[in-house]
Image (spheres, rainbow, N blue to C red):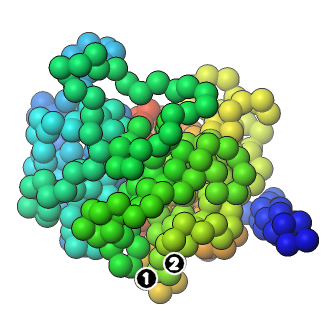
Amino acid sequence: MHGHLFFAFTFLASALFSQTDVPQIRFEANADFLKLPPNLYLGEVAGVAVNAQQHIFVFSRGNSTGPAYGATAAQLLEFGPQGQFIREIGKNLYAWSYAHAVKVDKNGNIWAIDKGSDMIVKFDPQGRVVMVFGRKKEASDEAAPWTRIAPPRPAVNGQFRQPTDVTWDRDGNIFISDGYINSRVAKFDKDGHWIKQWGSAGSNPGQFNTPHSLATDNDGNIYVGDRGNRRIQVFNTDGDYLREIKIDVPVPDNAQPWMGERPGPQAPLSMQSGAPWAICITPGKKQFLYAADGFPGRIYKLSLNGEVLGVLGSSGHMPKEFGWIHEMACPSENELYVAEILNWRVQKLKLYPGK
């Protein structure tokens, strides 16, 4: 009986916020906000984060001088509040392989998640390495990426296979989403000691298909952008499943993807409307959840219970259009920074809800 009630509630919670009349949020975008010095270029921008001093950290798949396949593609850059270039952090770092995300914790430490090396690196505010998670394949062996097999290899404590993001709860516990091959969230204490993991490959509650983005609310709940299942799952700090959020907003008839054919019903869920490629939660007493999809390239503003409050943007190459938003920073309700894979840029957005 309890199981039937649980799944009925889950279905109702998902269907409840299938909305057809969602307001468009008016917004401005600055696509030329970052001021790069001569001869420094962004590649695919995988990550963006903002600290308390409004410094912007950009994790880009740039600085690659190798062949088209297998080249190192990761560079961490810091910019000031007005977009002025400050420094490169971790130049030629041993972990740099293929940038995926960057985050800043409440103490100003900078965390870089590298999908290619299977490593997560914590820098102090001065840019020195203070903690390392994971380990890449050794060049002295027959090094090759982890392959996807069915069923997947068992996950190993402290080892990652294409990790994607990191977040923290109120006690400083560390949560790492892992990832494209493993399908779990790993939890460490604030000192980096392993605590537990949860999740496995699948589509049931508590299972994942590419846990791609993480965020935490004031209560310490962990929001997981379960991209391949086209949903956001919410857990408490112990990994207990609480609920899921699905974003169902009608797609405009004229919507086109950045490239390729318009996704049909048989397309992977990750390429369908509402699939959470990137999520972030605003600070403050009243918090909001933002999520971005790959098609039709929109950003959604939600309450923490999943109600869609507004929508903005579309796919494209111009300012105010997006090419696969891969990470977002939301330092306030009406200010967003979005990192774009396909357009090789960061846009700074100013939102005007209700206008």
Disc 2 secondary structure class: loop
Closer to us: 339 or 166: 166
The answer to whether residue 153 is left or right of residue 36 is right
Please say if 256 is above or below 199.
above
Disc 1 secondary structure class: loop
Closer to us: 234 or 100: 234
Q: CA distance from mark 1 to mark 2?
A: 6 Å
Residue 153, percent across and down? 51, 34
Residue 227, percent across and down? 59, 46
Residue 74, percent across and down? 25, 35
Closer to us: 319 or 326: 326
The answer to whether residue 205 is left or right of residue 298 is right
Residue 203, percent across and down? 70, 47
Residue shown at 38% from the left, 79% from the top: 170
Residue 117 appearing in the image:
yes
The answer to whether residue 57 is left or right of residue 240 is left
Question: Label 1 neighbourhood size at 10 Å, few (<14), some (14-19), many (20+)?
Answer: few
Q: Which residue is mark 1?
A: 284
Residue 104 appearing in the image:
no
Q: Which residue is mark 2?
A: 287
Please say if 186 is above or below 190.
above
Q: How many marks?
A: 2
Quarter that holds the C terminus: bottom right
The answer to whether residue 313 is left or right of residue 108 is right
Residue shown at 61% from the left, 43% from the top: 201
Please say if 285 is above or below 64.
below
The image quarter containing residue 282 is bottom left
Check whether the beta carbons of the residues at disc 1 and disc 2 lie within 8 A of each other.
Answer: yes
Closer to us: 17 or 206: 206
Identify residue type, mark 2.
Answer: Gln
Identify residue type, mark 1.
Answer: Gly
